[in-house]
Amino acid sequence: MLEKLPEHKRLSRIKLLRRVFFMFMGACLVSVALEIFLVPNDIIDGGITGISIIMAHLTHVPLGIFLTLLNLPFLLLGYKQIGKTFAISTLFSIVAMSIGTELLVPVSPLTIDPLLAAVFGGVLLGIGVGMVIRSGGSMDGTEIVAILVNKKTPFSVGEAVMFVNVFILGSAGFIFGWDHAMYSLMAYYIAFKMIDITIEGFDQSKSVWIISEKPREIGDALLSRLGRGVTYLNGEGAYSGNDKKVIFCVITRIEEAKLKSIVDDIDSGAFVAIGNIHDVKGGRFKKKDIH
């Protein structure tokens, strides 16, 4: 007899409204980035958005129409392969973005300096896309393809997206001129970085693993001086075969220097491994008072 899988829990109304709100605000920011900064200065983004900008420039058809039509096949693919919730969230975000770009067409650009447009357009674009991704959706069909490629090939999602965007951004050189192609690359890079910051936050968390001959002393010091909870794990040295205590804790980026100082004061020969964490949820991560 097959084991019954747990049923998918529906989001509460407050969580659903919060998710919809942030997706809508993200789509609005992307619309502003495109119509107020990038498109008037002949600067494109990567992916379907970049193709849509090129098509709209060549055919003089409204940008919003291409943004919706070109993404539809990928949305259908995402619905079948990734999930209903993801596809609906992405559809909502793309439609909101498309409507936003049409409403902003009569608005004059804030700058005709392509450098300023690339910088500020890239920042707004990255924040908007990051808000949508963090809320469970997507703003571009190429991201869906990249996710599927990642499942069936050794290429990562980032590598697949970059491979596609090299051709799209390169084509801007033949259509808008190579100066604008380079501005487009600058805007894309800024947006890429802002997406990471928006998703991960400025106060990025880090995981810390410490192996020392003085685990209790270090653990107590981290509790009292850094205000962070720790967990002791049982380990065994592969070479010596001796039992060891492994200290695990999660800190913020700005606490890294102080943690190293604390460990070095107690055991300068301790092994310390620190890695980035994209998200932290639950447990007792909230910081205690320190001194």
Image: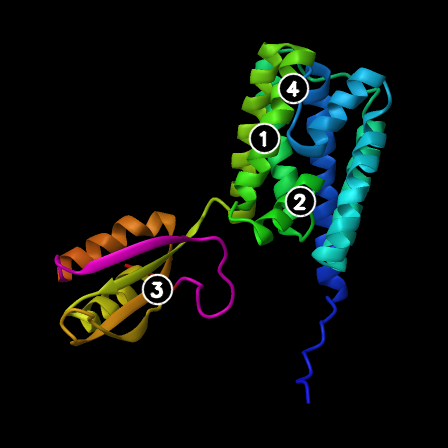
Q: Secondary structure at mark 1?
A: helix
Q: Residue at x 66, y 12 (%)?
A: 174
Does the magenta stretch mainly form a helix, a strand or a loop?
loop
Q: In terms of image quadrants, where is residue 140? A: top right
Q: Residues within 10 Å of mark 1 (few under 14, many from 20)?
A: many
The residue pinned by badge 1 equals 123
Q: Amino acid at mark 3?
A: Cys
Q: Is residue 129 left or right of residue 229?
A: right
The residue pinned by badge 2 equals 145
Residue 279 shown in magenta = yes
**Numbered badge on residue 103:** none
Q: Residues within 10 Å of mark 2 (few under 14, many from 20)?
A: some
Q: Residue at x 35, y 47 (%)?
A: 254
Q: Amino acid at mark 2?
A: Val
**Numbered badge on residue 171:** 4
Which tag, 3 or 4, sits closer to the chain's start?
4
Which tag, 4 or 2, sits closer to the chain's start?
2
Instruction: State how far apart marks 4 and 1 are (Cα).
Output: 23 Å
Instruction: State how far apart marks 3 and 4 are (Cα).
Output: 48 Å
Which tag, 4 or 1, sits closer to the chain's start?
1
Instruction: State how far apart marks 1 and 2 are (Cα).
Output: 24 Å
Q: Which residues are magenta?
A: 267-287
